[in-house]
Image (cartoon, grey):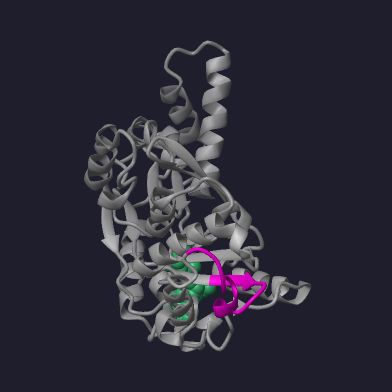
Amino acid sequence: MGTILAEYDRRRDAGLIRPDAAQRAVAARLDELTAQAPASGLFARFRKPPPPPKGLYIHGEVGRGKTMLMDLFYETVETAPKRRVHFHAFMQDVHRRLHDARQSHTQDAIAPVARALAKEARLLCLDEMQITDIADAMIVGRLFEGLLAAGTVIVTTSNLGPDQLYKNGLNRQLFEPFIALIKQRLDVISLDSPTDYRLGRVKAHETFLTPISGQTDARLQDLWQRLTDTEKGQPLDIDVLGRKLHVPQAAHGCARFSFAELCEQPLGPPDYLALAQNFQILFLEHIPQLNPDRRNEARRFVLLIDTLYDGKVRLVATSAQAPEAIYPAGDHAFEFGRTVSRLKEMQSASWWGKKIVET
Ligand SMILES: Nc1ncnc2c1ncn2[C@@H]1O[C@H](COP(=O)(O)OP(=O)(O)O)[C@@H](O)[C@H]1O
Ligand SMILES: [Mg+2]
């Protein structure tokens, strides 16, 4: 038995994790890769190295244990130098390097940047690959080609399968070679675990918090940390019909906005749809009481909730009022009734997932 499987079983037997056959299968696959991955040390320099093994693209829904397994692999594998980084942080680093290279009048900046990155990491573990931005979409193909050509082994996790990446993005056809490259040079495996382990942590917690106070702010922050394992998410831009929708914080399939950022801005159906397509959980802070003079905000809020509902997105919110008292009077207040009912359904345990287990 390989090291990763052994460690997986040890944690299971110690009661640290629950038995999960789908995860165990991925652990076995990671063990195979550990055995083939380029070793570090002196010997490697004198021997002609064998061709690097295929990397892995592990995808599956959130909370299935992709990151946990990749980290287990990263800690175990002896390849050096190695680098483990969140995909967005990696791309920010890439853009910084490209910018610097162009300052010194490098014609084709991607190739040298890829070579430098490959030298710094024979193994690159990227967590949460997600392409939402055209600036990323247009360079990842050549970047990854350069990394792979230089022999770097890439292991990545994603909530989406390769074909779902940058879906509906601008100039998607220019992105398609990247998908082909991934499928050709990485083994694409899905982690089909039935359980979202993270959701267990919101069980028995209220998700629609009233009123707006220091206390409910703190409870929302607590839920955020339970669901994302981080205090603060990363900012992210999503291309929507050639414009950018700015997401102030994103992490682990969760996005976080204030009501003002989402419903007091000139945003519309395509923006809300992009959110529903890119995230499983939306955190919405500080929904105010909406008086009749705020019918535009009310209209956007209705649209937002409808879109989230259709997309089966889960909602965590702080609100001045309970759903039925948010917009009691004004244009279309009657239709707001449907929004009230949906907001209530979205608080139910069944909406959050029948298969929630306590973790
Ligand atoms: N088999 C398991 N039993 C209990 N907890 C688990 C199990 N697998 C994963 N977890 C925990 O669930 C959370 C979500 O796992 P993570 O690897 O972050 O999921 P993903 O990357 O697929 O979204 C993590 O805190 C992880 O430690
Ligand atoms: Mg993850």
Task: Estimate the x, y position of residue 233 in percent, counting from the top left.
Answer: 60, 56
Above or below, comparing residue 6 to residue 238 in the picture:
below
**Residue 142 figure quarter:** top left
Q: Which residue is rendered at x = 65% and y = 68% of the image? A: 289
Judging depth in this view, the residue of 132 and 284 nearest the camera is 284
Task: Estimate the x, y position of residue 86 in percent, counting from the top left.
Answer: 52, 51
* Left or right: 87 in relation to 206: left
* Left or right: 277 in relation to 283: left
Residue placed furthest toward the right: 214
Task: Estimate the x, y position of residue 162 in percent, counting from the top left.
Answer: 28, 50
Q: Which residue is rendered at x = 25% and y = 50% of the image? A: 163
| Numbered marks: total | 0
Judging depth in this view, the residue of 151 and 275 nearest the camera is 275
Residue 301 visible: yes
**Residue 345 figure quarter:** bottom left
Above or below, comparing residue 321 to residue 86 in the picture:
below
* Left or right: 298 in relation to 230: left
Above or below, comparing residue 207 to residue 251 in the picture:
below
**In the rendered structure, does residue 323 fall within the stretch colored magenta?**
yes
Task: Estimate the x, y position of residue 4 in percent, counting from the top left.
Answer: 42, 69
| Region rendered in magenta | 316-331
Judging depth in this view, the residue of 165 and 246 nearest the camera is 246
Q: Which residue is rendered at x = 33% and y = 75% of the image? A: 193
**Residue 6 figure quarter:** bottom left
Q: Which residue is rendered at x = 34% and y = 59% of the image? A: 58
Quadrant where the N terminus lies? bottom left
* Left or right: 244 in relation to 34: right
Above or below, comparing residue 192 to residue 347 in the picture:
above
Residue 66 visible: no
